[in-house]
Amino acid sequence: VTFAANGVVTLTSDFGWRDAYVGAIKGTIVSSAPDVRIHDLAHEIEPQNIWQGATVLRGACPLFPAGTIHLAVVDPGVGTTRAPIVLLAGRHAFVGPDNGIFSLVAEALGGIETAYRIEPAGPLAFLLPRDPCPTFQGRDVFAPVVAALASGRITPADLGPLHEPLPLISPVGVVNLSAGAVEGRVTQHDRFGNAITNIRARDLRALPSTALMARLGDDRSVVVARTYGDVPKGEPLALIGSEGFLEIAVREGSARERLGLSLGATVRIEPSTRAA
Amino acid sequence: VTFAANGVVTLTSDFGWRDAYVGAIKGTIVSSAPDVRIHDLAHEIEPQNIWQGATVLRGACPLFPAGTIHLAVVDPGVGTTRAPIVLLAGRHAFVGPDNGIFSLVAEALGGIETAYRIEPAGPLAFLLPRDPCPTFQGRDVFAPVVAALASGRITPADLGPLHEPLPLISPVGVVNLSAGAVEGRVTQHDRFGNAITNIRARDLRALPSTALMARLGDDRSVVVARTYGDVPKGEPLALIGSEGFLEIAVREGSARERLGLSLGATVRIEPSTRAA
Amino acid sequence: VTFAANGVVTLTSDFGWRDAYVGAIKGTIVSSAPDVRIHDLAHEIEPQNIWQGATVLRGACPLFPAGTIHLAVVDPGVGTTRAPIVLLAGRHAFVGPDNGIFSLVAEALGGIETAYRIEPAGPLAFLLPRDPCPTFQGRDVFAPVVAALASGRITPADLGPLHEPLPLISPVGVVNLSAGAVEGRVTQHDRFGNAITNIRARDLRALPSTALMARLGDDRSVVVARTYGDVPKGEPLALIGSEGFLEIAVREGSARERLGLSLGATVRIEPSTRAA
């Protein structure tokens, strides 16, 4: 096994900052691993939006050092038979529900190295509450597992049998490349109202033309530029965002409000007619 | 005194994450106790909702190790004559306003051991600002007290005279048990839209029947189940939540939106007519 | 140079808690400076509201100990030619965009001591990503600079040439003092709905009368009092807030909702006619 805990733990969830859930998880971890350093990544994920949680993990976790343990709870399947898992990728460990939430970050880290189904009745049993709450595994299963891994009392392989994690189904379908064009879809909006698509920088580099525009539906198009400074204030543009995906933005404004691009809206990148 | 600080501090408030209040408290603590580890529990408590703050403390603080200091500021009475207090329960210390916010967590920890009214003119005087702001005691009284307790420079008994804390009045009344039934009320909603009542798991165990249903007003009823997996997606159910209270939920949905249960709505648990 | 890092870092931004931005910055810092202690101050600043960010920094940062590094990202000019800077004031270091966001806190700390323009091509080059994203300097420039300063690998003067930071233009104009009166404007609202003005405590002390009232437009006035306890519950008042500015508040209520004072609304402090 190539995972060695470094004492750093990150938390990502849809728990928000108004209930006891985040604090209950922190208390559980601190109680059995008092020296870990816990970092909040995001707790205002839209309730039960696995895709949004997966993109947060992809954008943040690989920047932490090897040996970090990432706990993520966006879990519409809690209280059903979905498995609790630990997944190893790029010398990071991920703890949470088996619903695909770790698939994007695992891909970004070079692929899943191995994964285990957490077996509460195994060697872990004496670290868990005797009567775990079926609807709050974050507190009663995942947090004790994080603490046990962080303190080195247990190794990932001790947690249970090997497990094949579920893939994550994109909410909007895939990217299509045709001769001289790329077509994708809006997969999420960020807090600033940027409409982020599933079109990658490398998809654009595969196109023969470098002067490009983004078609939004039939009658609107915006310039593909490098950065906000390339257009006047208040004007829309398409650009490669901080994780390498094309996004539609408005300089010092909100593309979501200004252009009304809903989740799943089609974005087509073509050679610019102005440049032609 | 049975309280010995362990270097861990938690913060709970209705300050939100958009103003300077949370940072001002952290800076004050870090300046005089640089080695404490501070954990945010919840800062998006509804403004001045003492009950919501009290439930967050009850759900999170007991999971921290003994010796933790919990600062809580949900304080409609700031700038009046309400007392600032330190309360000890279960070898934890709680610092904040005397408005009942600590009553639920103290009960969960076995009851109040002792409490002191913070007397700014006493031995504490040289640790406080000379001209404290009457409307931000969180920064000018509570945070210096937390730092002084955490660093061991002062003990709880040094802070002022013994004090009898105010009780917390439930916003919705109490639970009634009749022959074969329990009637309670909705006391809060969480971020997921679950409607949490004041009916405890042990109230249900006192009933003769184990096949139960929850009546919501006159014409609606939902099944009492163990977990979400017991009903199809999108269906309502009643179940015991993570802190031992009955809640009305919708699997992968929001009971608040779907069933429109407002604060104080009556929930009556009866033998299931289907099972009869 | 009078700045010596103490291992404490604070974060302030308009990133919110629902995207990967906050976590990406934390991961970058932790990866190259694993021992720093990171404190979240505020991440729900209104998107691109520099004034609001500046007031958070003013209210929180000076309370941290000397040697703290404060990272702030509210940055409508990201992706344009605005400079990235490091600014020193009161033995604190501030890292972020040159858009005036540090001007209020620098003034509160006794003025700007010195400032440098961050030059990515200088000695810093080997600490930055080779291909920094032009729209996320928080991750690709500011966070590596924070880590390098915190770990002592680089000093502020190594970062680039001396720089004159931009001032911050008040969104609402200045305070006018006439004979026996002061006129200012509402510059922001906090989470509780308090309407905070640009009138300072010392402006009031310059008035001949001590019995004062606040005129809101033509036909409304509220008493100027010391604290909430001076008026009945639900009643409006004007008082000096926790940072020394006059604010219009409602005891246990929201002045924003109750009085409808919008940003820029005029507030005029005069001798009280009741007391005359």
Image (cartoon, coloured by chain):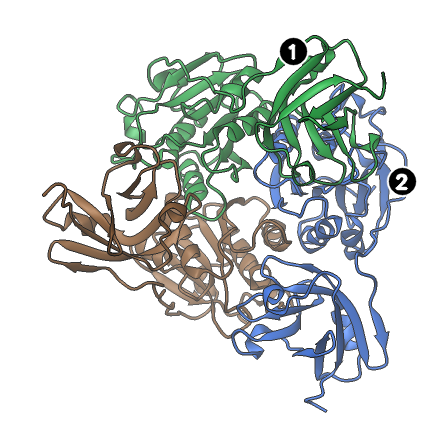
Chain colours: A brown, B blue, C green
Instruction: Give how far across and how far down residue B45 sits, in percent.
Output: 66, 47
The answer, for residue C8, to whether it is visible in the render is no
Instruction: Residue at 40%, 19% (x, y): give it.
Output: C155
In the picture of the structure, the residue carrying the numbered disc 1 is C177
Instruction: Give how far across and how far down residue A60 sits, in percent.
Output: 40, 46
Chain identity of mark 1: C
Instruction: Residue at 34%, 33% (x, y): give it.
Output: A233
Instruction: Give how far across and how far down residue B31 sits, in percent.
Output: 63, 26
Instruction: Indicate whether A190 appears above or below B154.
Output: below
Image quadrant containing the N terminus of chain B: top right
Instruction: Indicate whether B120 appears above or below C115.
Output: below
Relative to A51, B12 lies left or right: right
Q: Quadrant of residue A182?
A: bottom left
Instruction: Residue at 78%, 40% (x, y): give it.
Output: C234
Instruction: Residue at 61%, 67% (x, y): give it.
Output: B255
Chain identity of mark 2: B
Q: Which mark is residue B74?
A: none
Relative to B145, B159 lies left or right: right
In the picture of the structure, the residue carrying the numbered disc 2 is B163
Tell me the element at label 2: loop
Mark 2 to mark 1 CA distance (whole Å) = 47 Å
Depth check: A247 or B1 in front?
A247
Q: Quadrant of residue C132?
A: top left
Q: Are marks 2 and 1 on the same chain?
A: no
Instruction: Indicate whether C268 appears above or below A110.
Output: above
Question: For the view shown, which residue lies furthest in the front direction?
Answer: C218
Relative to A176, C21 lies left or right: right
Relative to B146, A181 lies left or right: left
Label 2 Cα neighbours within 10 Å, binned few <14 / some 14-19 / many ≥20 = some
Residue type of the residue flagged with mark 1: Leu
Instruction: Give how far across and how far down residue A187 sits, in percent.
Output: 35, 56
